Image (tube, rainbow, N blue to C red):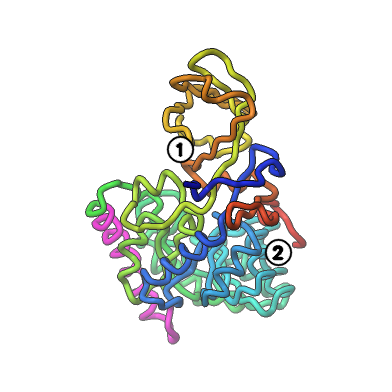
Amino acid sequence: MENWFEVKNSDCIASPALLLYPDRITRNIRLLKRMVANDTSRLRPHAKTHKMLEVSKMMIEEGIEQFKCSTIAEAEMLALSNAKDVLLAYQPVGPNISRFLKLIQEYPNTHFSCLLDNVESIKNVNFQAREQGVKTSFYLDLDVGMGRTGASIKDNEKLWNCIAEQDSLLLEGIHGYDGQINNVDASIREKEADSGYDLLKHAFDYFQEKCTYPLKIVVGGSPSFTRHAERPNVACSPGTFVFWDWGYSQKIPEQGFEVAAVLLTRVISVINEHRICIDLGYKAVASESPLPRVKFLNADDAVPVLQSEEHMVLNVNDSNEYPVGTELYAIPLHICPTVALYDKVAVITDHQKVKNWQVVARNRMLNI
C-alpha cells in the first residue's frame, strides 16, 4: 500500500526539497473554519508560515478575508493575492514606515494596518503619514505575557492621550500575541490563554470607552488557538495549521490538523554498518531547535546525531537498508522557518509532482 507522502516521479525533484500536498492544505483550512463555526470573520491567519501567493488564494477561496503577516514583503504578497485586510503584525521603524505607507497607496483594494506599542512610534508613523497625505490604521500591541513586544496596561492613559492627538492615524483595535504558551497539557494552555486574554480585555475595555466607534481584538497564535477559538468577540491568528509540523503535532494534538509539507532528502554516503549521511543540512531545515529536527516517515529507526550546513548524519539499525540514493521523507519539527529556506516548493497531487510554487515572500523585498 502506498504511503500518502510518496512521490512516483521523484526523479525530477532535486533534493533536499520541500513538498506540498494541496488536498491536505485544503482540509486543514476547512478544519480551521469549523473550529470557529465557519465564521471566517473570527480568523486572521498568519502568512509567515507559507509565504506563497497560491496558498493565500486557497484561503481566500474558502472565504477568509483577513490576514496577519510579519514583513512588508509578506504584506505585499497578500495584497497581490487580493486579500481584503492585512495586518502587519510588526512595528515598522526606519525606512519600513515609508514602505508601509507606500503599500497603502499602491494597493488601494487592500486595507492595511500595523502594530504600534509606544508613543514615539505612534508619533513617527502619524507624522510620515501626514507628510505623504495618507490615512492609516493600527492595532495597539499589548504585552500579554511573552515579554517580547507590546505595551504594558500601565501605560494605557499615556498611550490614549497620544493616540487622541494624531490626525492621520486611527486606532483600529487591540492586539496580543501569547507565543509563550506551548505547554503539552491542554488545561494549562487554557489557563494561560485566559490569563493573557484578561489583560487584553482590560486594555480593550479602557480604549473602547474612549472611542466613539467599535474596536477589534486580534489575539493568539497556534497553541492558544484551541481556547481563543471559543471566544466570539476576537479574531484568531494561527499560521502553522496550514502545513502543520512535527512539533505542534506533539504539543497540540487536539487540533487535529494534517501534515501537508514534507521534506524529501536522499542518502549521499554510507559511513559504516550503522551510520549514513543525508543531504539535509542547516540550510534545508530549521535548525533553531536541538536534534532531532525532523521526524522520518519511512525510516523509523533513523536517529539524527550530527548536522552541519549541507549534511545530516543518522544512526540506523542496518545501513544496508539505506544504500546511496535512498529517498527519505521527513516532517520538520518547525515548518515556518523551514519554508523560508526554499525559493520554490514541489506541489504533489496523486503521488505526482505536478508543478512548482514560488515562495515569493521569503524575499525581504518584492516591489516596495
Q: Position of residue 309 (x, y in %)?
A: 63, 28
Above or below, comparing residue 328 to residue 175 in the picture: above
Q: Which residue is pictured at 29% across the width and 46% down the height?
A: 184
Q: Nearer the viewer, residue 251 or 69?
A: 251
The kind of secondary structure the magenta stretch mainly shows is helix
Q: Nearer the viewer, residue 236 or 162?
A: 236
Residue type at mark 1 is: Lys
User: Disc 2 and disc 1: Cα gap in Å?
Assistant: 43 Å
Residue 210 makes an appearance in the image = yes
Label 2: which residue? 98
Describe residue 61's horizontal placement relative to residue 184 as left or right. right
Residue 193: mark in rendering:
none
What residue occupies the far bottom of the structure in this picture? 212
Which element type, helix, strand or loop, lies under badge 1?
strand
- Which is closer to the viewer, label 2 or label 1? 1
Q: Is residue 325 magenta?
A: no
Label 1: which residue? 295
Q: Which residue is pictured at 50% across the width and 47% down the height?
A: 2
Q: Position of residue 311 (x, y in %)?
A: 61, 26
Q: Which residues are magenta?
A: 189-216
Describe residue 356's horizontal placement relative to residue 307 as left or right. right
Residue type at mark 2 is: Ser
What residue occupies the far front of the structure in this picture? 1
